[in-house]
Each structure stands twice: as structure tokens, then as C-alpha cells.
Amino acid sequence: MASAKDSHPVKLARPNSTASEESKVVVVENGKMVDVQDKEITMEGLCSISSYDQWVWVAVSGPLPKPRYKHAAAVVQEKMYVFGGNHNGRYLGDIQVLDFKSFSWSKLEVQPQSEASELTGTTSLAPCAGHALVPWGNKILCLAGHSRGPTESLSVKEFDPQTCTWSTLRAYGRSPSSRGGQSVTLVGDTLVVFGGEGDGRSLLNDLHILDLETMTWDEFETKGTPPSPRSEHAAACYANRYLLVFGGGSHSTCFSDLHLLDMQTMEWSRPEHQGITPEPRAGHAGATVGENWFITGGGNNKKGVPETLVLNMSTFVWSVVTGLEGRAPPTSEGSSLVLHKVNGEDFLVSFGGYSGRYSNEVYALKSSRKSSVPSGQINEPETNGLASISMAANSSRGVIFEIEELQDEKTIKRADTSKTLLQAVKGEKNQIEEKLNQEELQSSRLKQELANVETKNVELTKELDLVRNQLSAEEARASRLEKEVSDLQQRLQKMEALEKESELLRLEKDADSDDSSSGSNQRPGDRGFWRWNG
């Protein structure tokens, strides 16, 4: 952490920037980025994005965090806090802060704290990955995650950005077992923990609920068929009642299934979805904009998933928002995704991830799908000095916008009419874009199938050439054998002729021997052997 006397200017840098481009200058003081330029310049980050539903690389200033994945991020008071993660197999324990006003990074140093009331004590949280960060008021809750040291149960940590201190909250009831890669979803005043990977790489599909008012853990028995054990999935809450779980993976496969849990009846179901069929994936990130659930990144056993999907949680219709070529961070595994509002616009902000390399880049997407809150009230901070906007529930899915300090009722009617027409045009545009995205996705799939067929054809051609070569070799070998057999037959015939000649000669010799022996034995007076010995 830099001290005041170590303050130094840091310039914004963008890839392939030229010397003529104007740089922003900030000063690092006590670990925080302090702006030295006017607000018009420092607020350009997200406001400079004009196109909807497209991922845009965003320039940032300050010392860049170490590239990482499987970290966690949360937004509190116009700042995104990033904690932990993994880099080259090493767990990280730093806290990085991205100020959305100045779009500058700074690193926070955890401070010791001596007083604790509802806490079991203060701590410097151990480096970890696969955990979850949940904003709660002006503080941040951290749950679960894998770390070097073994732990038996899941503890709840709290980070106070004002004092830069970690604390362990005292919880009651039976705490869940330690795990990483689980989902932690805020549903009303409760945190719902589902699944993950426990000790010994055991996959889980248990459900635990933490009441944040009483800090009490409960493990509920559910009805219906729960999702199979999994980790690295995504979960979201709809209408403060329904928990949705999508995707994830086991040790051998990835999933593309969608599950729904009614938190009132505690019953699992499999809703029938419409639109496109999502590809299996694990390690993806999710964020909700009203009733729309955005899913980015992740991968399966074969490849990463480049398309950004959105699920309308009220109709269960899947559609493709956009896609990215190459290995940009929003398409990678283990990136973080948060929602931030600027001037009434909804921005998705993606950071980090792994897609063959570790990333520390920031990407943003301005959503054309507007927020609609099923119940409750949203208080947005004023983004200009002209008006303040409040939203209150009109129905389970409707929102009424009251605009103050307008002077003319006719102007309101004309604005409403224009807004209605604009929304209708945007709706038609979104439908056309969705159809176009579906056609592009189908075309991409057909191209992939064609490529697979061509690859198979090449493999079969190679096999055919190999068989032909083997057949030619066998034909040559058979020809040699035939020639050898013919030579042997000729030699056999010669041997037979020689044997006949030899037999004739032997017969002739025997005949000559008989003639000579008969003539000598018939002479008179011969007594043979007895004569010479008589």
C-alpha cells in the first residue's frame, strides 16, 4: 500500500493507443485512487458505451490486479470489490477495488480491529478460490471456497469497506460442510447455498438456508427431484420466491439442465423452456437484470462457450444476446459478472477468467432489456440534478416510474407515447435480433457438423488408403509365393526325370551284371570255392 509521500500519477492506457490520445491522471494515496481531473473525464468509463448488447473492452487506470479466475466480486456504493481467486494453482487473498466513477483500480490492505460485538472475532481471511461474495447493506459477506488449510464447516465472513476489516460472524444452527464451487443466492433476507464440491472432491446437491436477521442455519427437506450433485453452476432468484439453478458439472460431464425451487413449497421442478437449447457448461457466471438472467462464459469438456445467453425467468425463453470471437474474458471460465447502473442504464461488468490464459481485463455490456422488479422498491441514486426517479411495485412483474419536477401534463403524455413507440420498436428489434442470433447459432452448428463430417471423411480416406496399401502388399506377396511354387514344381519335374534316368541306368547295370556272372559260372570243371581249398 502506498503512503501519501509515495503518491505518483498513473495514466490510463489502452491497447494500440497513440501518443495523441488524451490520458487520464489519478494519484495513488493510502491504497486509494484519487482523481485529479474533472468529473466529466472520470465518468467516461461506462457512459462512453453507446451500443446495446455488445461486449466492449473498457480502459482502466491504476495498478492492474494480478490475472485470476474463480474469484468473486460484489458492488457496494459505486465500487466493485474483487477478492481472492486462483493464478497458476496459487490461491490469492488480496482485495482489489474498481471505482466506477473514476474507473481506476486500487488495492486495499486489511486493517486489524480490536472491537467485536456480534462477531466471533476479526481475522485476515485466508487466500481462497471458488467462494462467493454477497453485498449486504454497506458490507460484503464472504462464504465458502477452497483454501490451503482444511476446514470442517462453512463459516460466514464479513468485510467492512469503511474500516477495511474482515470479521467472522457468529452463526447458529448446523453449519453446512466446507465446500467450493457452490452457488450462494440472496433471496429476500436469506442466503441459499446449494451444491458445490466438498472435501475429497465429493460432489454435493444439498440445500442450506441462512437467515440473515437471526444468523441461523437451516437445512430444509425438499420435495420433487433436486438437481444432481454438481459444482461450478449458476443460480438466481426470481420474484423473491423462486430459486433457479442452471448448468454446472461433475467430474466427468457438464450439464445444461434448468431446475426451479419454489421457496414457499420447497418443491423442485424442471420447467419446460423455449427458444434455443443452451450448450452444456460449467464455470459460467450469471447476473440478473429484472426478470432477465444473463449467463456468460463457462466451458465443457470440448471447448469454451462464446455466446452470452439470457433467460426470461417469467416465460423460460432462452435467447442469445451476443457472441465474442477468440478468447475474450466474458467467454472464459471462472470470470466474475456484476450489475451496475449508470444514468438509468443497466451495465454488466465482467472481470478476469481463464481461457488458455489468465485475464485481468474489464469488459462491459449495456443491456437493452430494462429492469423490472417483481416486488419491493428500488431506490436509484441521482445521476443528474434535474430529476429523481423512484420505482414501486404495481404487480408481481410490473413497475411504475414516477417522474417528479415535470411541469406540463401534455409533455408527459407525449413522452409516454414516444416511450411506448420506442419500446415497441425496441421489442421488434430485439425479436429480429433474437431470430438472427438463432439463425447464426444454427448456421454455426451446421458448419461445425459439416466440419466434423469432412474430418470423418478425411479419416476414412486415410483408412481406405491404408487398406489399399496393405492389399497391394498382400498381392505382391501372393505373386512371389506363386512364383516360388512354380519354381519348386519345375525342380520337382526335373528330379522325377533324373530318378527315371537313374532307374533305367540301374536296370541296365543289373542286366549287364547278370549276363557276366552267368557266363563265368557255367564253365566245366569249376568247383568254386571248395576247389581252391581242397
Image: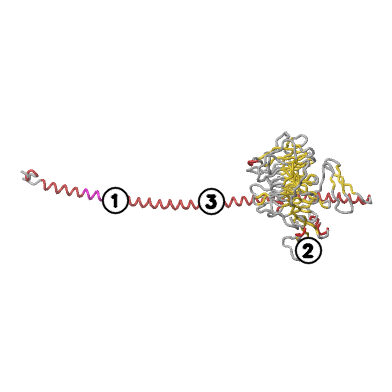
Q: Which of 533 and 531 is in front in this view?
A: 533
Q: In which quarter of the image is residue 118?
A: top right
Q: Which quadrant is home to the C terminus?
A: top left
Residue bearing mark 3: 464
Residue extent of the magenta highlight: 498-507
Q: Where is residue 215 in the image (x, y as percent from the top left)?
A: 77, 38
Q: Where is residue 377 in the image (x, y as percent from the top left)?
A: 85, 43
Amino acid type shown at disc 2: Glu
Which label's residue is closer to the chain start, 3 or 1? 3
Report if the CB atoms under discs 3 and 1 are less than 8 Å apart: no
Which label's residue is closer to the chain start, 1 or 2? 2
Residue bearing mark 1: 497
Q: How many residues crowd mark 3 within 10 Å: few (<14), some (14–19), many (20+)?
A: few
In the rendered structure, does residue 500 fall within the stretch colored magenta? Answer: yes
Residue 436 appears anywhere in the view = no
Residue bearing mark 2: 22
What residue is rendered at 28% in x and 51% in y?
Answer: 498
What residue is rendered at 77% in x and 55% in y?
Answer: 32
Q: What element carries label 1?
A: helix
Q: Which of 59 and 257 is in front in this view?
A: 59
Single out the mark in the foreground, 2 or 3: 2
Amino acid type shown at disc 3: Leu
